[in-house]
Image (tube, grey):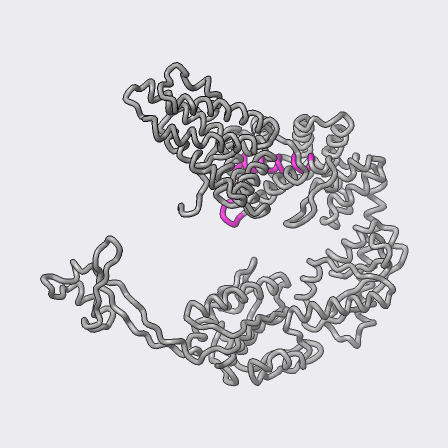
Amino acid sequence: MVSFLLEVGTEELPASFVRSAIAQWREKIAASLAEVNLAAGRVQVYGTPRRLAVYLSDLPERQPDRAEEIKGPPASIAYNDGKPTQALLGFARKQAIDLDAIALREVGKKGKFVFATKYIEGKSTPELLQQLVPQWIAGLEAKRAMRWGNGEFRFPRPIRWLVALWGDRVLPLEIEAVSSGRTSQAHRVLHPEPLDIASPEAYVETLKSGFVQVDREQRQASIVAQVQAVAETANSVASMPADLLEEVTDLVEWPTAVLGSFEEEFLELPVPVIKSVMVEHQRYFSLHPADRPAELVPYFITISNGDPAQAEEIAAGNGRVIRARLEDGRFFYNEDRKQPLDAFVDRLEQVTFEQSLGSVLAKVKRIEQISGWIARQLQLNRGDTADVLRAAHLCKADLVTQMVYEFPEMQGVIGRDYALQGGESAAVADGIEQHYWPLGAGDRLPIALAGQVVGLADRIDSLVGLFSIGKIPSGSSDRFALRRAANSILSIAWQADLEIDLLALFVEATSTFASDPPATFNILLEFFGQRVQTLLQEDFGLDYDLIDAVVEPTNPEKVRRSLQDLQGTLQRAQYLQQLRRGGTLELLYPTVNRTARLAEKGDLAAEVLDPAAAVDASRLQEPAEKNLFAASQSIYARGQTAVREQNYTILVQALLEAAPAVAAFFDEVLVMDKDPAVRTNRLNLLCVLRNNAGLLADFGAVVMAGES
């Protein structure tokens, strides 16, 4: 067994790419080896701003020999009166095998076919690696890639050196005129001299001797430990947001935590402003009193990639930078507060939302209108409605403040602060900030009612407006993050238990704002069907077929019903999952599925539920069909109660009780009677049963064990 090391040395890589590339190689390299029948004992991927590396342990020296069975022509074509035909001879020549190696074997119902077994000698592992390594490098996906020199190869940054070691020998490789060797580069400042790697096993320690910590997990652990230790020297606790920690881990090769400070007078600024300067602009960790985590102290910690001996100079330089940024923040903050937040609203006329959709002020007016519709649906009282409409009016005002112009990440946050200082209620102020929530996957959902309603209205307006001008996501392209907007609408409605009729809101919004209301509405319908389906599976872990039973993007009627009653859709899908886990679905399925299959031969509309309206009782001849009619009346009555009380156990129990009557009906009654009137009457009876079962789900979409 032999180990292998690959290091790709580059100019400084984007931090986000380092993290992504490590994850990609962990998955792709193991899969790539498996495709050529190789397996490493361990696949360890490393990454820093200047390099990506992979260490593979215990690789075999050769690919194993293998026997490959190849299917040839049918026996009827391969032989003529027992003699080989040209088809068989051609097959043997192509596979380089003797006719003696040919065998005949039955293939299901297709008859006999010719088969040949071909023995293939394995290639040497170094030879395979020479083919695979360029694919590993070129196969890394990145948001942006570049070319350099006169080459055509694309990578996030120019490649400057390659290390490729098969055991203690250099494996010859070349990427864009860069040939492989055993020489790597150490830390730019702390060890400017190159390093020779003796063997793959020596890689990590050799680089460490050159002040490069290539193991990302160890580098991050070192940062955490250093930050905590330095914070203690300032009698404080460090805030370490996960995103910031991930980023700084990939900005340095030899991390050193350095304590810096700024004047205490800057603490008069709102905490979010100071933290924005520290985190978003400077990549610093903020410090807090141990017993007051919401407050700040006039210190920060930066992670340096320089000389630890120069810590004082590094701290002083970073202090000058943050002081200047905080001074800017203080100036903008004081200037903005010379007038109330309301005074900024009209200036939104000068800011374009989208060229075809007008200004941000026009968008705000639409948000106010949609917020009013939602408030009426939710039957909010006068006070809550006033808060919602006021928050809608002010929700974008801070976009034209000097603070947000300089610090865009403060939108909503500084709007809340200015609103409170201007005398607005806490409900309105919270709504201004929270209408942007969730900001990303896994982020907080709005807690304030005004934030929920205005957030829904804002996203509905964006979806309707952008869809109406053809800005529809396709494939991986979603420039306006419309999938996330739709997901947020559903998440807010479900998590806050808002009883909104999304279908009615789409009808109102498209008819009021879209140039082609029917086309825009239909796009929204299909788009949201997909979003409901995705979230039910990803966020709630429900089975795909049970989701299809309540909402299916290709079935407009199912989508309409799901959007009219989002809470009911979630409840029905979760209840079906509960029935499956408890075994009740298996008991219920034969009755409703058999009924639904034959009901397809009828033409009774799906919305007809009352047996008395669909079935002529005077035409019922057989005792079994009379019994089923009586059972269907009970199902109808109990189904209405189930929907009214949102308790579908009532309907399920009625369907289970009807099982004997359904079985007897199919055993004793000829549904497809020669008399058209009798036949239609019996089909209508089955259709009514199907329609009432459909109050819970379309059982035709349910897949039971053994089905496909």
Task: Find residue 355 and report its horizontal and vertical position in percent.
Answer: 60, 38
Residue lying at 54% horizontally and 71% vertically, measured from the top left = 43
> Magenta segment, principal secondary structure?
helix
Q: Nearer the viewer, residue 686 or 497?
A: 686
Task: Find residue 377 and report its horizontal and vertical position in percent.
Answer: 66, 27
Residue projecting furthest to the left: 81
Residue lying at 77% horizontally and 37% vertically, measured from the top left = 344
Horizontally, residue 623 falls left or right of residue 162, namely left
Horizontally, residue 334 falls left or right of residue 474, namely right
Residue 459 located within the stretch drawn in magenta: yes
- The answer to whether residue 291 is above or below residue 125 is above
So how many labels did they put on this image? 0
Specify the segment rendered in magenta.
Answer: 453-477
Horizontally, residue 94 falls left or right of residue 289, namely left
Residue 85 located within the stretch drawn in magenta: no
- The answer to whether residue 306 is above or below residue 702 is below
Task: Find residue 87 and report its horizontal and vertical position in percent.
Answer: 17, 63
- The answer to whether residue 393 is above or below residue 256 is above
Q: Decide if residue 346 is in sight here.
A: no
Q: Nearer the viewer, residue 467 or 353?
A: 467
Residue projecting furthest to the right: 265
Q: Nearer the viewer, residue 556 or 9?
A: 556
Task: Find residue 502 and report its horizontal and vertical position in percent.
Answer: 59, 32
Q: Identify the image quadrant of residue 262.
A: bottom right
Q: Identify the image quadrant of residue 78.
A: bottom left
Q: Identify the image quadrant of residue 392.
A: top right
Q: Nearer the viewer, residue 646 or 669?
A: 669
Q: Decide if residue 479 is in sight here.
A: yes
- The answer to whether residue 528 is above or below residue 296 is above
